[in-house]
Structures are given as structure tokens and as C-alpha cells.
Image (spheres, grey):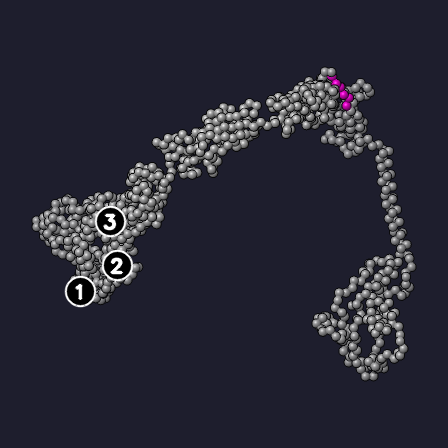
Amino acid sequence: MNLGYIVLACTLFAAASSGSKTGLSVKPPCRSGFSQNFYTVIVPKVVLHGQNILKVKFEDCQHSREMGFVSSDPNFSVRPDGAVYAEQEFANLSESVQFMVTAREVFEPHIWETTVKLAPAGHPHPLPLTKVGIDEMLSRALDSQSRVIKFPRKHQRSSYGNGLRRQKRDWVIPPINVPENSRGPFPHMLVRIRSDQDKDVGIRYSITGAGADQPPSGIYNIDPVSGNMFVTQPLDREERASFHLRAHAVDMNGNQVENPIDLYIYVIDMNDNRPEYKNQVYNGSVAEGSKPGSSVMQVTASDSDDSTTANGMVRYRILSQSPHSPIPNMFTINSETGDIVTVAAGLDREKVSQYTIIVQATDMEGNLNFGLSNTATALISITDINDNPPELTVRTFSGEVPENKLNVVVANLTVVDRDQPHSPNWNAVYRIVSGDPSGHFTIRTNPITNEGMLTVIKPVDFEMNRAFMLTVVVSNQAHLASGIQSSLQSTAGVTISVQDVNEPPVFPVNPKMIRFEEGVPAGTTLTVFSAQDPDHFVHQIVRYSKLSDPANWLRINRTNGQITTMALLDRESMYVKNNIYEATFLAFDNGSPQASGTGTLQIYLIDVNDNPPVLIPQESQVCQRPRPNSRINITASDADSDPNVGPFGFDLPSSPPSLRHNWTITRLSGDHAQLKLRIPYLEAGVYEIPITVSDSGNPQLSNRSMIRIKVCPCDDNGDCSATGAVAAAGLGTGAIIAILICIIVLLSMVLLFVVWMKRREKEKQAKPLLIDPEDDVRDNILKYDEEGGGEEDQDYDLSQLQQPESLDHIINKPTGVRRVDERPVIPESQYPVRPSLPHPGDIGDFIHDGLRAADNDPTAPPYDSLLVFDYEGNGSTAGSVSSLNSTSSGDQDYDYLNDWGPRFKKLADLYGGGEDD
């Protein structure tokens, strides 16, 4: 029996097992290709020309590629929709026909192939489509593959019933089907490859391709002599679903005997993979009060098995629901798509906020007897809708507030709402619908507690309103759900009592402005700046005081608030800004506690012509010979304001007569004039020119200003020269001579001082020295005579008497007897530094300082240590020093050694003890 029937039987069995189920099939992950690898169709023996035989289904995931179908048998063709039809008429089709159908992209080289087998009616039918029959087919699947595949040859023409003859093509090798997960034994023979020429020559067979000599290599091999082809290990369709190999036949010399043939091996899928969910826990939601059939969520499971067979077709069902409220089956699931929907009404978030559902996915189209299953958890949250109106806890609220206070919470309005906290369905919104026409109050919502805080936003006055009766309505940010009515408890009344407090006096007009001319004398009454006490129900006395008066010009009456002047009011004062002078006054009552209010008085000062004009600049210079630019521009200014300022008048006095003879002044504009020389030459010097300037006020004020003008000789550029500037400064010849004499006197004094210092230095050097110059050994070279020989000490080691270069051996030497050339290792004393040029009179002090430092220096030789003398040699006239000893028999006083300094301290300690020893 051919394996094509096995595949057909498996396919029909899967279809039969799913025939009882309804609904759409599970849509597997899209993979481009033919829906089947092998099509087997039973056709009648008579096939007409153009008759459709079957339709191959090709899945194009991109839906945009242009595909073309080609048949390997020229007697059959494929239309663009996959319909296979006959190119000619067959009167008596007596044997099976097998050919390949290839799908190819028009613009890309990628191809897909499937095998079509046409079996004429009357051939043996496959085994019955029962489980026993299918098991027998699968058990015989491998054995049925053990057939002989010959290399194709060209045959003679064969005739059909109508006498037509045709040339047979090369054979189309049917695919080899191998079930996955086979238990062996391995290697297991699949087919035998054979050439018709193996009787004439020795043939060697081989196979190539992925699975043979290419990765994954070693899955298939072939006996080179017999041509038997084997599979060496179990196959896994999920790893690789098909193999394409090529069989070769060569002679003993390696020469090709047959053309290579293509071998297609398809791995038959087994149900060895259970469905797998993408997530172990799925989260979904549905609004409370939803109608039956409302979509909730979708769960998805995938199966690695072949999705075109029942092995990969997954079905879903709900195993359990928790809690079982209001009924155990509030939800259902679409068995093919995994969509979960509601099936009953009654979802209420306030009762059940979340459901837990266990969903089972089973392959084999949900067959619990043969399919594999897996489970996942679906958490369904019930979302809130505004189906509960807010309700105030009481029907009447009360509170009290002091008058004139702002942002004071009068009362807290409590509310109850069973919807989702801190959501628009729960957040309360309060409104005052009556009782507050002036808008004194507002209600703010506490975001945490949802309470309404009744707050004062406009001060209340006890004298006007002693109490308020408000009506308050509460609602939510979100509108109530359809069909939900507002509650009667959403409205309440609020009673507010106003408390009386002592209010400060109030100035009716604040600030108050008055107008006065400047210059009013002291003691002038300006106005009455009084305040009123708003506490009408309590009689209180108001008193006044001055709070701010920058120029100290004003006085206020303590009892009635009358304002009088204390000094002259001056508009040009630095305390007046834009003609306005401001002063602040305080009004306070005698209440408990005392309250006070402030008022500002603004005095607008009207200008009077009390300031004469002045001229600028005060100094200038011109050339003694008039030039085009030898003019002086003069500007007049006046501290007053219009109309007491310009245009100004400029004039030169008539006396002395030389003034108008030498100078002339011309007005350029209302504020500016020009002064220049009238004569062609004026002697250099400094001139003070009086100019009379008058304003346009009423009465008119005039002022004579003096301008200091330096007349000097100028260079070609019209600038004063240096000598001219000096002359113009007014320094005559006598002044210059006086300055030179002063400079000479100063230089003479400096010279005399230097001479005196030199003389004093010589006198100091002439003082006699403390010692005879012949005995002064400073900076002299002393020559000593050589003592010569005389003693046999030529072999004496003088190194013992030399100062060592290093003191390391002395530092590390243990305490005990020390040598004469070993000085104490202690810091040396600091001797006085001799001046480079000492005065002869300071020699004595220098010697005494050096002697004092030497006496106190224990590091200066001779060192205070035990002296060890070496042998001086034979023949010394002095003899051995070791033979010396004290021959004194009487007591001697050695206390005078203490007066000899630190060097004799050791001897003084040894011999100066006296009777203490």
C-alpha cells in the first residue's frame, strides 16, 4: 500500500473527528507554502480535455506576491487559482499518474513543491478510516517505504484506448514519508536505489544534500553496493519537516552512469507537543452592568505540531470560575478563537471586583481522549461605572466664621459614594445653589477624604449679615450611568453664623489727594483726614497719629484728624515725586483688642516761581584769536516747572564797558545761548564773565552767573597749547621763579643730609679698636714653623687623630669609653653671625657673644669624654703619660671650676664635691 493513502487517511480521519464541531478553525501562524505535501485523488478512467481534477491550496502570507504554478507532467496544467486540469482527453486511464506541482514567485527565485497522485477508479481502496486502521497504517508506514527506486530511463511510446501514442517522460519519484519519533531499530531501511546497468558494470551509489553529507549530516546514508538507503536516528518534524536529497550512480572508475535523481523525504507529524500559552496569566476587564455577549479578553495558545492536521488544532474551554457570584457560569469562551465573553447579566463591581478563570487548551481539536492539554489563568477585573450617586451623611450642616476673615474653612461636608475611590465616578463636586448671592463662600473637595470644605473667599461683615443659610448639592465628576437617578440625600442645608470682631477704623477716601501751592507757611491747615469705625453696634473713640512723614512737614490733630503744616512746603524737595508729597497716618480705636487702620494723604504741590535760573557750564576756554569753533555754548536750567521756566533771556552787564567790548552773547533757543569774542585778539589769561539770565515766570526771576573762561593761544587744530594752558592758568613770571627757588632749596637740603651721613660714617670708623692692630688676627694668614722630627713616631697611625668623615660608627657604638675624636652627636650651638662690615666699636660685643656661645657648646673640642692615649714610640723624652698621677697630698678647693663654664662642669662635679663625697 502506498504512503499517499496513509496521508490521505490521516487527513480524512482528522476531518471526520472534527466534523461534529462547529465554529471557525484556529488560525495557525502563517507559513507560506502548499497546504499539503502530497495530494492523492481518485479520478474516473475517462478524463475530458480541460476538466478540473483537483485544486491545490497555496498559502501566501504576504498576499502581494505574484505566484505561478507549473506541472512537471505536460498532460496536466495548473491554473493561477491552483486548479489542476487535463491538457488532453484520456479515454481509459488504467494506471496511477504522479507528477510535481511547483509554485514560483515571478520576480524571486524561491520555489515551493508538492506531489499530486491521480489514482483511477477501481484501484484498491485504503484501509477503513478507523483508529485501528490508522494505527495499522502508521505501523506499516516505514515498511511500505522499502521499495525499489530505479534511475529513470527513456521508454517506447505506449498506446491508450483511443489509439493515441505518446513518449514517456522520466519518472517522477514519489516522496518518501517517514514518521517522526520512531523508536527504531536504527538504522532503518527506507528505499533501495537501483540502476538498470548494475548487471553490466559495477555500480556505486551515493546520496548528497542536507541530512546526508551536509548539516545536519549523518541522518541518512546509503549502502554504496546494494543501494539500500537508511535513516539512522529518530526524526523531529518540529526541527525539520522535509529533506531534499540527490541519489548518484557511478561506475568503479567514478564515471557517472546515471543522471542524479531527486529524493524528497517528508517527516510525518505526530502529536508530541502540547499547546503552549503565550502568557501564564492573562488580564482582562469588563465594565460592571455589561450586557450578555460583551467581549472581555482573548487567550491564545500555540501548538508546535502541524497546524494543518488535528495534531496542531487547538480548542479552548473554561474549567472553573471563582467566585461563583452571581452564577457559576458568568463567562464563556469561543473554543476556536479563545475569545472570552459574558453570558449573563449581573456584574457588580461593588459586590465582586475580580473573577479568576482557569482556561484549558487542548489539541486534536479538543479531543480530551487523544489530545494534549495545558491551562492558563485569566484574571477579569470588573471596571467601575458611575452607578452609585454620592450621598451626604446628614441633611443639615452648621458652622461659624469671624467677620473679615479669608480662606477660613467654615464646615466639612461629609459624603458617601460606593463607586471606585479616587476615580471620576467617586470624586465629589459640590455646588452652592442658594443662600449666597454675593459669592462669599465656595466648596473645595478634599482629594483624599472626598469631603467638601466650605471656605470663605470674600470677607463677611457682621454689621450686614449675621447668618447665612446655604443649600448645597453634591455630584460626581463623571455623569451618572444611564438609568441611574440622583439620590435625595445629594442635597443638604448649611447654617453659617458670623462672629463679630473689633474692626479697625477705615478712611473713607484712601488715598486722599489735595492740591496746594508750594511755599505755604507753617501752621497752615490743609485738610481734615478722618476715619470711621465700622463697628456700628459698639461706640468707640477714634484717635490719630502720624505714621510716615519723610520731610516732617505735617502735623495731625489727635482727636479730629486735622492736618496742618509744620514747615514750608517745597515742590523742589527730594521727597516730592512728580509734584506729589505722600504722608501716612494711623487711626486706632479703644476697643479690645485695639484695632488700627492706615490712610495715605497725597499733596499735589502747585509750582510757583521761586527758583532763579542757573547757567552751565561754569568753566570753559577759547582761543585768544577767534576761530570758527571758538564759541562757548551756554545752557540755562531752572528747578521750577512750566510756565516758570524758559524761554530764558541772556544778557551781558553794561559795566565794566570792556565786557561788552570784548564779548558778545547770542540766544540760540529758549534754553541755549552762545558766548564768543568780539575782538580779533585777547591776551591769554583767565576771565570771569558775568551773564544775566532771566526766566519767563510771573513774577520774573533773574540771576547773574559768573563763567570762568580761560583764553589761551591755540595750535593749528584749535586746541590750547601746553605753554598757553599754563599762561592761561594765571601763573606769571614771578610765580614761576618762586616755584623754581623752592625746588632748588629742596635739592640743597637733600644734598646736605647726604654729606652729613657720610661724615658720621667716617667718625664711627675713626674710633680706636679694643685690641692692638698688631694683635688683630682677623682675616690674617698665620704661618707656623715646622716642629720636625726628634721622636721615633714616624710609624704612628695619624688616622686615629683625624676627624672621621662619617659618624655612623659612633652613633651605633655602645656606650662606654669614647675616643678623643668622637664628638657628641647632638645639635650644634648657633654662633653669632659676624657682620660683613662691623664697626670697630662693635668688636668687643662680637667677641663676648662668641665666647658665650662657645662656652655653652658641648660639641666643641675638647670633648667631655674619657681620653685614650696611644703609645708614642721608643725613645720619647717625655715618657709615658700613663705614669702621671696626682702627688698632691693636701686638700684643694675646686669650687672655682664651676665659674669656668659648661666645659669644666664635669671636673667641677668630680672634684668640687668636697665633703659631700
Residue extending furthest bottom?
A: 874
- Is label 3 in contact with label 1 (beta carbons under 8 Å)? no
Residue 431 visible in the current orientation? no
Q: Can you identify the residue that label 2 sits on? A: 181
| Image quarter of residue 170 | bottom left
Say if 594 sits above or below 275 in the image.
Answer: above
Q: Is residue 519 magenta?
A: no
Tell whether 5 sits left or right of 408.
left
* Element under disc 3: helix
Sooner in the amino-acid sequence: mark 3 or mark 1:
1
Q: Main secondary structure of the magenta part?
A: strand
Sooner in the amino-acid sequence: mark 2 or mark 3:
2
Q: Which mark is residue 905?
A: none
In the foreground, 288 or 644: 288
Amino acid under disc 3? Glu
Which quarter of the image is occupied by the N terminus? bottom left
| Image quarter of residue 814 | bottom right
Sooner in the amino-acid sequence: mark 2 or mark 1:
2
Q: Which mark is residue 198?
A: 1
Amino acid under disc 2? Asn
Tell whether 575 sits left or right of 321.
right
Residue 665: x and y, percent? 74, 21
Amino acid under disc 1? Asp
In the foreground, 28 or 452: 452
Query: Rounded to the nearest whole Å, what is the CA distance between mark 3 and mark 1?
Result: 51 Å
Instruction: Point out the stretch of residues depicted in magenta.
Output: 700-705
Say if 131 sits above or below 874 in the image.
Answer: above
Q: Can you identify the residue that label 3 sits on? A: 365
Tell me which residue sits at (62%, 26%) in the image.
504
In the foreground, 182 or 143: 182
For disc 1, the neighbor class at 10 Å (few under 14, some 14 to 19, many from 20) is some
